[in-house]
Image: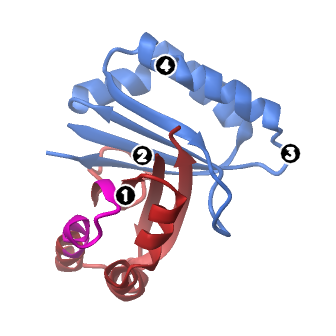
Chain colours: A blue, B red
């Protein structure tokens, strides 16, 4: 099992509506991409200074599932569309959960 | 339930032994900090360019549990000790999982 972790820091002009629309788009991915064993995401709670703005944590069975997810048209559309438009910096890690 | 997500990018001189020791230290935290409902962490798999080096994803019941964890002596020791010594940049987000 693998964990795909991404944090995003938004550009200064990102609006709450954009974040809400992104949440809906990402929220639809598990139904579209069966390789997603678990998919948790959401905006930062704003309880700690210096935090980034959004996080995605996806759990997938193996490397093949990870790349199926990353290359899936619905994920690519989200990544190349709203995420690319909104993101100033991102930090990604994939971890083997054994 | 809350998700506490952190990615770390190491300083260039960090050694595999330091990472292994950190894994052991963090691996002990769930037994030391009962507020941790779930605690997943580990080094990046190295399958994507530009990734950070390590990720921690902690699941906790609520905000009180989050701050108990963050302020717990064993967490503080890990954060102020090896993590501070190893970390070039970090990116953190807390997400409400509802």
Kindly report which numbered mark, 4 or 3, lies closer to the viewer in this rendering: 4
Question: Badge 4, how many Cα within 10 Å: few under 14, some, many 20+?
Answer: some
Q: Which mark is residue A5?
A: 2
Asked if badges 4 and 2 are on one and the same chain, I answer yes
List the single residue furthest toward the left.
A98
Asked if badges 1 and 3 are on one and the same chain, I answer no
Chain ID of residue with mark 4:
A
Q: Which mark is residue A13?
A: 3
Distance Cα–Cα, label 4 vs label 3? 25 Å
Q: Could you say which is closer to the camera, residue B51 or residue A3?
A: A3
Question: Badge 3, how many Cα within 10 Å: few under 14, some, many 20+?
Answer: few
List x then y, in percent, for residue A28: 53, 17
Chain ID of residue with mark 1:
B
Label whose residue precedes the other's in the sequence (4 or 2): 2
Chain ID of residue with mark 3:
A
Q: Residue at x 33, y 81 (%)?
A: B78
> Disc 4 designates what residue?
A29
Asked if badges 4 and 3 are on one and the same chain, I answer yes
Distance Cα–Cα, label 1 vs label 3? 28 Å
List x then y, in percent, for residue B42: 26, 58
Q: Could you say which is closer to the camera, residue B62 or residue A56?
A: B62
Label whose residue precedes the other's in the sequence (4 or 3): 3
Q: Residue at x 36, y 77 (%)?
A: B75
Distance Cα–Cα, label 1 vs label 2? 7 Å
Q: Residue at x 42, y 22 (%)?
A: A71
List x then y, in percent, for residue B27: 20, 67
**What stretch of residues is rendered in magenta?**
B25-38
* Count of marks placed on residues: 4
Tag 1–tag 2 contact (CB < 8 Å)? yes
Residue B75 drawn in magenta: no
């Amino acid at each position: 099992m693998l964990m795909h972790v991404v944090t995003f820091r938004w550009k200064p002009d990102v609006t709450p509506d954009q974040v809400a629309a992104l949440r809906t788009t990402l929220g639809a991915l598990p139904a579209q991409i069966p390789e997603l064993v678990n998919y948790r995401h959401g905006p930062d709670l704003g309880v700690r200074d210096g935090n980034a703005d959004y996080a995605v944590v996806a759990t997938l069975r193996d490397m093949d599932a990870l790349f199926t997810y990353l290359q899936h048209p619905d994920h690519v559309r989200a990544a190349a569309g709203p995420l690319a438009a909104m993101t100033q910096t991102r930090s990604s890690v994939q971890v083997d959960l054994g």
